[in-house]
Image (spheres, rainbow, N blue to C red):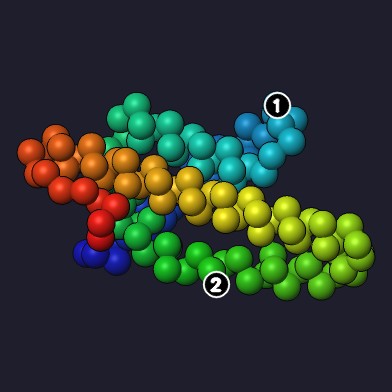
């Protein structure tokens, strides 16, 4: 039964991604359809149009596989030797800086959310000391 639930949830996530692809093609948005799909999913979860339980197990199953899914994109960089030029070095620096910024911002946001949830539960602890 668990396999069926996970499969159906992954199918739902895939359908949301397909809707994102459709929106990109129709509106000529200069973003990948999968990103639009993720934004749609985020909006639907935020506005409680779909409950988290409807996608949680499927997403939880896919999350550990994320790095495996990104390997083809990483290997694809080999097809672009110009990335090894001086412009490529600049691009690499920008990528590293933006990644570090994103990680830091995500960590701060996670701490803020955890503090808020702890305060809502009446627990008095500071996340930054963990």
Reading the image, the residue beneath label 1 is 27
Closer to the camera in the image, 39 or 113:
113
Image quadrant containing the N terminus:
bottom left
How many discs mark residues in the rendered view?
Answer: 2
**Residue depicted at x 63% and y 36%:** 22
Comparing 82 with 30, the one in front is 82
122 displayed left or right of 127: left
Q: Position of residue 92 (x, y in %)?
A: 75, 61
Give the answer, above or below, for where 74 lies relative to 91.
below
* First-in-chain label (1 vs 2): 1
- Residue 52 appears in view: no
Above-or-below relation of 72 to 90 = below
**Discs 1/2, front:** 2
Q: Does dot 2 land on a helix, a strand or a loop?
A: helix
Q: Which residue is mark 2?
A: 68
Residue 69 image position (x, y, % from top left): 57, 67
Q: In the image shown, does 29 or 21 lie closer to the viewer?
A: 29
In the rendered image, residue 44, in percent from the top left (x then y), is placed at 39, 32
As measured in the structure, the alpha-carbon distance from the residue carrying label 1 to the one carrying label 2 is 31 Å
* Res. 130 image quadrant: bottom left
**In-image side of 29 versus 23 (left or right):** right
Q: Residues within 10 Å of mark 1 (few under 14, many from 20)?
A: few
- Residue at (85% x, 61% y) in the render: 88
Which residue sits furthest left? 122
**Residue under the image location 66 percent in, 59 percent down:** 96
When asked about the image quadrant of residue 73, the answer is bottom right
Note whether 75 is above or below 127 in the view shown: below
- Tell me the SS state at disc 1: helix
Cβ–Cβ under 8 Å for marks 1 and 2 = no
Residue drawn where x is 63% and y is 71% of the image: 71
């Amino acid at each position: 039964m668990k396999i069926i639930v996970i499969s159906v949830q992954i199918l739902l996530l895939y359908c949301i991604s397909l809707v994102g692809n459709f929106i990109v093609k129709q509106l000529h948005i200069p973003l990948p359809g999968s990103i639009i799909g993720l934004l749609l999913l985020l909006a639907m979860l935020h506005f409680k149009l779909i409950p988290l339980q409807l996608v949680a197990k499927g997403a939880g199953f896919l999350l550990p596989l994320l790095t495996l899914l990104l390997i083809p994109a990483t290997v694809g960089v080999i097809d672009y030797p110009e990335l090894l030029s001086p412009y490529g070095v600049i691009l690499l620096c920008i990528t590293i800086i933006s990644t570090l910024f994103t990680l830091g911002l995500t960590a701060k946001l996670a701490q803020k959310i955890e503090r808020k949830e702890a305060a809502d539960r009446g627990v008095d602890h500071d996340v930054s000391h963990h």
